[in-house]
Image: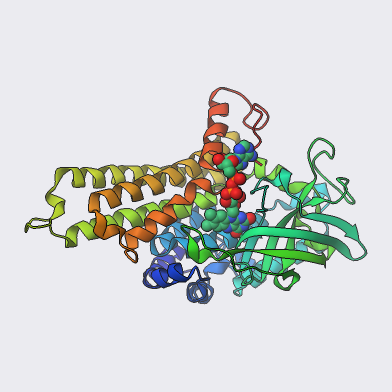
Amino acid sequence: MTDPVQIAEQLAGPFAERAASHDADAAFPAADVGDLRASGLLGLLVPEALGGMGGGFADYTRVAQALARGAGASALVFNMHASVTGALATIGEELARELGATDAFFAHRDRVLAAAADGALYGVAITERGAGSRLSALRTTYEAVDGGYRLRGRKSTCSGAGHLDAYLLAARAHDGAPSSPAVGQAGEEPLVSHFLVPGDAVTDVDDTWDPLGMRATASNGFSIDAVVPDEALLGGVEGLAVLLAYVLPQWLVASYAAVYVGVAQAALAEAVAYVERRGAAGAHASIGDVGWVRARLGRADAQVEAARLVLEEAGRLVDIAPGDPATNRQVYRSKLLAGDAAQEVAASATEACGLGALRRGEPLERLLRDARSGAVMPPSSDLCADVLGTAALGRDPVHGTDTRPW
Ligand SMILES: Cc1cc2nc3c(=O)[nH]c(=O)nc-3n(C[C@H](O)[C@H](O)[C@H](O)COP(=O)(O)OP(=O)(O)OC[C@H]3O[C@@H](n4cnc5c(N)ncnc54)[C@H](O)[C@@H]3O)c2cc1C
């Protein structure tokens, strides 16, 4: 197998060339996704037996960083796809069967994964107006009907909406009661489940996405009122969504970290390139001769590398000990540090470079805006810090405070 990181590094060049125009239009990066499809990277996390590359979480983090060095928004679209394929590929068969997953679920899962290796693109649809990505506050509902489950509601923010072959969509039980095997406790916690919804089931995709940064994710909203077959229920078990978010947070938490470490790396590289080509105003010396400009680059270098190393360790731990409390703490650390590093490095780099780097269309100007989104993506940096602080106090990170991340 060709090294997937090398493939991603080759794609990053064309991604970077197209990034400015995708950003200007807040347009879905169709050409970048076409490259991902042709390269086979959409099958990165699909087992080799199903036609994929058989990669693990650590492979994902390196590939996503490389893509994000080219275009952060396209790397985020890839991140959503990887969250779906990675989560599906790592569902433990024995445990899932014990919980109630059927042969039909596994056959459906394998078809979905094989299609990804063939170029199908997936996304994640959790966020709703008023609830954010807090799973327990969602209003989109599902209920058992003849032939499967009926899903009804509206999602406000979904990267690639309208361009996806399927969505991993979160919804709560219509009347709070399970209609099939379930985990979670109705009454105390709303019963929230994930469904794999085909692309043609979503309607009314809006065209309102016009944010500060990560504009080319085209994260528009859509409506759903459709019946999906039984096997579309993730894991074949109701109520898995909140449980999995707590127990195995990597695909909901640290996958973003890889993208924002890549954005931080790109901001540093752009700052270095800018400093090297720009002479000091009115002088022949380079601004690289200014001590505090070099010091800002130096601090950025240390911060980017620290965030990368924490992410690298999270990737290693996820692959050898998924769900372990120490692994999960590292996952939260990596999300927090990546979000902080991206925005602090981009802000400091633009200050070192000056107005020229802040002009519309300059790569650093886009990177500064893209970097700002890292801390608000779920769980927000403040929430990650709260989880870590709770754990540092020796309390249960989930039940030890009034704050529930999901
Ligand atoms: C570029 C981009 C792409 C995105 N793509 C997708 C996508 O593909 N699919 C998708 O589902 N969503 C997507 N989102 C939405 C993203 O998940 C939301 O930004 C996120 O859900 C947070 O919602 P919010 O920004 O409305 O903030 P809120 O969740 O309303 O947060 C606002 C404030 O409340 C705090 N807060 C948040 N949660 C809690 C809590 N549990 N307890 C206490 N305080 C809390 C936060 O720290 C923050 O200070 C995307 C967002 C961006 C920026």
Q: How is the image coloured?
A: rainbow
Coordinates of residue 329 in the picture (x, y in percent)? 54, 36
Q: In the figure, is residue 75 to the left or right of 172?
A: left
Q: Is residue 206 above or below residue 136?
A: below
Q: Looking at the picture, does residue 197 appear above or below residue 243? A: below
Residue 71 % position (x, y): 42, 64
Q: Residue at x 30, y 58 (%)?
A: 358
Q: Report x, y in % for residue 359.
A: 30, 62
Visible residue check, residue 250 = no
Q: Residue furthest right?
A: 146
Q: Is residue 171 above or below residue 44?
A: above
Give the residue displayed 41% in from the left and 69% down from the top. 19
Residue closest to the eye, 395 or 72: 72
Asked which quadrant contains residue 101, the reply is bottom right
Please state, as top left, top right, bottom left or bottom right, where the C terminus lies in the image: top right
Farthest top residue in view? 393
How many discs mark residues in the rendered view?
Answer: 0
Q: Is residue 343 visible to the viewer in this orientation of the structure?
A: yes
- Left or right: 279 as drawn, with respect to 401: left
On the rendered structure, is 48 left or right of 261?
right
Residue at image coords 8%, 58%: 282
